[in-house]
Amino acid sequence: MAPSSPMLNALLLASCAAAALLLFRSRMTKGDLWHATLTPLSSIIGSGFLIMAPLLASIVGPMAPVAILGIVLLAYAIGHVIRFNIMHVEPRLADGRPHMGTREIEHLGNIVLVVAYVIAVAFYLSLLSSFLLGYLGVNDPDLERGLTTAMIVFIVCVGYLKGLGGLERLENISVSIQLCVIASLVTGLAIYAGGFLTERDIRLDFPQRDAFTQFQMLAGALLVVQGFETSRFLGDKYSREIRVASMRNAQIISGIIYVVSVVLLMPVVQGMDLNHIQLSQIIDAMAPVALILPLTLMIAALASQFSAAVADMAGGGGLLRENSRGLLSARVGYVSVAAGAIFLVWAVDLLEIVALASRAFAAYYFLQTLLALIHSYRHSPKRSGPRRVNECLFIALALILAYIIVFSIPAK
């Protein structure tokens, strides 16, 4: 089917409409579990589902599908640590029974993470403003900062006036738009990739690097799929069981999206300049697939950055509420995160400090593995099979995360 085929474009619109019908009309999307899933899901897929395929292709070439599978599995294992802590460590912290050092590690991790959230909110919305104004042909740094500030103010007003439920409604709209576009994208790419692979081989012209540098860059790419930890900070509305299930569901859904999109995008990225990856280049590369995809992907790019910022605002507000032991409400937390993000937008070059946010996320995960390891060693049944498996997993993850903190470099 040619890209200009009316039948193909109609098929993509139909798949988008079917996804919209499911998301907006299904009973599944009306329950607490789906609403709790929105925050981690929007943060994970909002962080980089469009950029992951060319990013990994620029690092490991045709091995990108294997790399994304490894990254998704590693992220899921880290998610297991956070879920373990929600169920076992969080209750002991809440009732004042933590072992010496546990609360200090938790507080340190929370301080590191809230800084990362502030940077992330400013960065995501700055990218959104830059991309939108660039698409309109406007190049004005002050206007870009002003638009970013206006969006931060809008989000925090919704959060302050409507609470977590208001932020979830924003996420519902933006994530639903993304998922509809993803349904259309996967349909078009599946048809295109099927025809491509029957006629040609995938040949990627990617920068040749030594193995150590590749692992350093892959370590940096892990943080693109962060965001699942936001379930941890929704405790003022959802039970521990729902938060655990929401994180698991979000990681499974996003993991499938990442793996499938990377596999299907391999024929498309071979025509890109993998030495200088830009979002506009990715969208332009969709034109050979179907005429409607560049426009829909532009919409998805805007929605993804917006939803990721909303999710991190929600996570940051909940984190400040928890870290203050309830002295600060989540609403005050949203205002604090917004104030910090606005300061960063006007005071610093975000591209220079976003790498610090990535290391901060890795540091938070590292501290969470220490908490899980301490709890398992002191409180799990002796000579238990699950305890031994968990402790081996926690030690392995701690070593991997320590490597990421020390050696990871930006993947670009």
Image: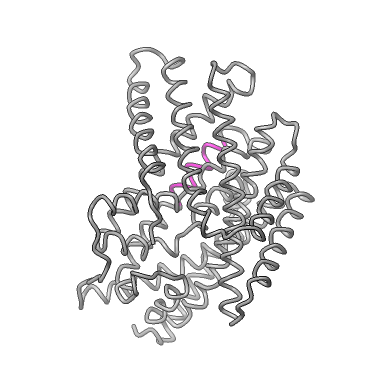
Task: State whether the magenta stretch is mostly helix, strand or loop.
Answer: helix
The count of marks equals 0
Q: Position of residue 119 (x, y in %)?
A: 58, 52
Please name whichever residue, 125 or 343, is drawn nearer the observer in this view of the structure: 343
Magenta stretch encompasses residue 286: no
Q: Position of residue 91 (x, y in %)?
A: 59, 23
Q: Position of residue 15 (x, y in %)?
A: 47, 70
At 65% from the left and 58% from the top, the residue drawn is 347
What's drawn in magenta, residue-wise?
A: 242-253
At 36% from the left and 60% from the top, the residue drawn is 260
Please name whichever residue, 321 or 342, is drawn nearer the observer in this view of the structure: 342
Picture colour scheme: one colour
At 58% from the left and 43% from the top, the residue drawn is 33
Q: Is 119 placed above or below 134 here?
A: above
At 48% from the left and 26% from the top, the residue drawn is 371
- Residue at the extreme right: 161
Q: If the image is split into quadrants, where does the C terminus sit?
A: bottom left
Image quadrant in which you'd find residue 142 = bottom right
Compared across the picture, whether 403 is left or right of 130 comes to: left
Q: If the image is split into quadrants, where does the N terminus sit?
A: bottom left
Q: Position of residue 190 (x, y in %)?
A: 34, 69
